[in-house]
Amino acid sequence: MPFRLPAARLRGLSLILLTACPAATAAAQTAPVRLTEAQAIERALRDPDFSAGAAARIDAARAEARSITRFDNPSVSARRGEISGPAQDEVETEIGLVQPFDLAGRRSALRAAAGAEANAVEAEMTRKAQERRAEVRRAYAGCAVATETAALKRTLVSRLAAAERIVAARAGAGDTAVYDLRRVRVEGRSAAAEADLAEGEAASACMALESLTRTPGARPDGPPVAPASTAVARAPRSDLAAREQRLEAADFAVRAAERSRIPELEVGLGWRRLEVASLEADGPQISVGATIPLFDRGSARVAAARARQKAEAAELALARRQIEAETAAAQARSDAAARALASSRSARDDAARLGQIAETAYEAGETGVTELVDAYRAAHDAELSTLELTGRAIQAAIELELAQGGPTP
């Protein structure tokens, strides 16, 4: 007789399979994708939402500058008049083209101001790319530190599990008290809980890297590496260059406002035809005119342009002082983080040797389990401290690079 599961169990098994399949699919979809820091930066900068937006802003600013042409558009006019009287009829027809000429150079000043503004926008987009590069590096380092932290906590769990086996063997042989076994078990369970929490925090920390690179499961290709101690060459700050270009644009705007007070010349060329009774006459027609600044003398425009010029100059001076302060502060943090990391590395090596000494002493019966657990914890804390300081040193180096102008993306 064939064996058959009850219908209720079949339904339960089906529900388990349906629940497990999506989980397996999701796990397969989020398989780790190992990226170097350079690859992560490249993917983030190639993001269409970022690169297309920056290119569109630059194109718009350049198009705005090109829209201010050297000459204004001409105007065309046509007129036909007819006069009827008792003696004779008169018909007059005119067609002409009027071209204004900017002899004062107002439009050229406006065009130069728009060009300087376009340069400012381009410099701002360069700075945004540098800031995005720094953001990717921060996310990369944060993910690497969090992942390595979880691995260190899992290593402590393995060490305590090995110690538990040693203590269990000694307790079974009557060489040590059951208290020692329970103490190690408590430490092991606590370490396991910390490891589980650290793994969850690592997954959370790596979400920023996945989002920036648009790569599900993006992970660093190795543990975090402390930055080199070589000096970083300073480069011109793109955001400062943008402010300088905006000050230049304000200078040209003042020049354009002042030149708007000068009359604008208009030259017209056309053709005129006159019909009187049976007589007809036609010929070319030339006209010359000029705008007269009678009611609008441009005083308000000049005052507004000069006020904007002063504001841009003041903001540029403040920005220069702020950048100097930011750079000095970033340099101090970077130097302090490097010194702290060097000290932590020597302490980590000493703590690791203490763990080996404690294991040997415990197996020989010279020390108790408390000393053994303390040695494990000391070595673990030293490793965590070194890892944390490595991450802080990386972050400080990133901020220093950004403050000093950052590399050109």
Image (tube, rainbow, N blue to C red):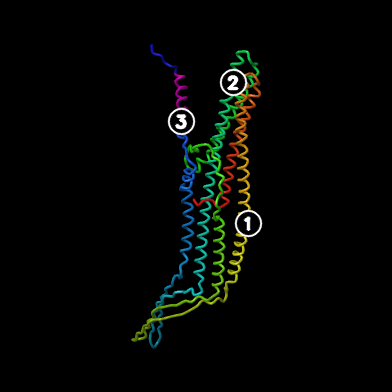
Q: Residue at x 54, y 51 (%)?
A: 406
Q: Nearer the viewer, residue 97 or 87?
A: 97
Please tell me which of labels 1 and 2 falls first in the chain.
Answer: 2
| Contact check, label 2 and label 3, Cβ < 8 Å | no
Q: Nearer the viewer, residue 362 or 95?
A: 362
Q: Amino acid at mark 1?
A: Arg
Name the image quarter holding the N terminus. top left
Q: Nearer the viewer, mark 2 or mark 3?
A: 2
Residue annotated with mark 3: 22
Does 284 sit above or below residue 118? below
Please tell me which of labels 2 and 3 falls first in the chain.
Answer: 3
Q: Amino acid at mark 3?
A: Pro
On whether residue 98 falls in the magenta region, the answer is no
Residue annotated with mark 2: 164
For label 1, the SS is: helix
Residue annotated with mark 1: 321
